[in-house]
Amino acid sequence: MYRFPSASRSNLRNALGMAAAVSLLACLGDGGAGSAGDTGGTPGASGGTGGGSPEGGSTGSGGQGAGAGGSTVVPSGGTSSSGGSGSGGTAGAATGAGGASPVGGATGTGGATGRGGSSSGGTTGGGAAGRGGSMAGNGGVAGRVGRTGGSGGGTGRGGGSSGGATGSGGATSAGGATSAGAAFSQCRFHFGTIDSKAKNGGSSMIGQLDYFTPGWMGTNGDVFDQGYVCEEGKQGAVLGNLVPVVVSYIAAGYVKRHHNLCDANVSGCSGGDLAKNGAQYIAQDWNAILTEYRSFATGYANCWGTTRPIVFEMEPDWYQYTISNQTAPWTAAQAGSRMTELVNTLKASLPNARFSLDVSPWVGENGTDNGKAWFANFDMSLFTFVNTSGGGTNANTTKIRSANNMTWSGLASVTGKPILADTGYGANGTSAGHDANWDVVANINARIADGVIAIAQYNPNSNWGSTIAGIRSQLSTPKICP
């Protein structure tokens, strides 16, 4: 509906005040069907401005004549309420009381606010107010209908008006399986696996998954080589409905290739291993590592695009480069600042990317402080998630791993981030087998209560899709749905 500018509304109110009041005394009760509540009545000689409004829109001043009940506006996703019948305003100079507006309109569960309207002398329901009596005094325009709550409930916009107040926001939906997040389209516990395992499992498995993990980024060369991720994950492709969760191993992979280093849990490399020599070589080759990060950032931007979500789990076991047996260990602050550089290098080309910070459950005094001192060195605003990596994780205990003191709930509390868990893998991300403990409803619900929102089975059983389908409806909704 067109809204007159403020000055035009004031002129209209003043010009019509006297004439309308007199001419409509003879027309009591014929208010007609309620409009959207743009105008309220003005009493006699005094052109009333919009009354002070409750939330949801301002009330008009009392008008001449009995207005008909307001028509109902049914907001999408919300409940409707009937407009009340307007009672006649007081003639002459006395100002009729403006109708009491509801607070933003009736709100359905997860729904939006109704249009609280102005009325003439009557109370309005959740719908538009009845147009009673004179059309002179212009009450506040009602707040617009809020967005529907399927996606968490939008906020209704308050109606700007002469004398009107801002409408209150729509209520937020209760979440559930259809609420959208920035990374995942559904608010539920998420299941993922390696892309090749998903494809081997066929449609019965793929249909139950939320994400897939390709080969680790940066393990094979110094330039972008993951165009296959874009092909298998593009819309309409076999994994087109899933989010790619990519493990970034560029820094470690670069120095392993160029200095013949092994992972910390592998021996036999002439250059040593990451647990002893990694920090020295990563610092030495930092500019080359940033160059490789830019190559992958632009490569993904070109083939994946910059709007669909993609998640990067950053550099497994970053903590190892600060330990004392390194030849040139970093400080924790250096680890934090370098991680910021890596994330920002990817973000420069991929504004749609979300990031996860790796967790080493043995940080500090074997994880006793749940990583509080360690994570204080990082800009956590850059990260949507934290994630486990390497070895196995416990589905059936409060500890992430039995040998360490860090707990699932402690990690979530310290970081304020939801947790992406995994079932473990060997060197360079090789599979470690299916972990049936992560198929038990009681275990998963306990971990959901602790802040875990996803599990990646790196080597799932062939019937895992059927397993997920059988337990999905029994699982709790996570506290956070990014």
Image (cartoon, rainbow, N blue to C red):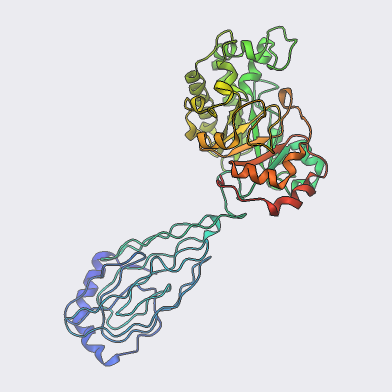
Residue 291 makes an appearance in the image: no
Which quadrant holds residue 155? bottom left
Q: Residue at x 64, y 24 (%)?
A: 249
Q: How many marks?
A: 0
Vertical order, 88 against 208 (above or below): below
Work out whether residue 401 or residue 189 is closer to the camera in this orientation and state it: 401
The spot of residue 28 in percent (x, y) is 30, 90
| Nearer to the camera, 442 or 300 | 442
Location of residue 316 with respect to 185 vertically, above or below: above
Q: Quadrant of residue 354?
A: top right
Q: Is residue 438 visible?
A: yes
Q: Is residue 314 above or below residue 164?
A: above
The residue lying at 77 percent from left, 30 percent from top is 431
Against 164, is 370 above or below?
Answer: above
Q: Nearer the viewer, residue 289 or 207?
A: 207
Where residue 87 sits, quadrant-wise, is bottom left
Q: Quadrant of the C terminus?
A: top right
At 67% from the left and 50% from the top, the residue drawn is 475
Locate residue 53 relative to residue 332 in the image: left or right: left
x and y percentages locating residue 259 in the rendered image: 66, 10
The N terminus lies in quadrant: bottom left
Q: Residue furthest bottom?
A: 26
The picture places residue 359, in percent across and down from the top left corner, at 59, 28
Q: Is residue 385 left or right of residue 236?
A: left
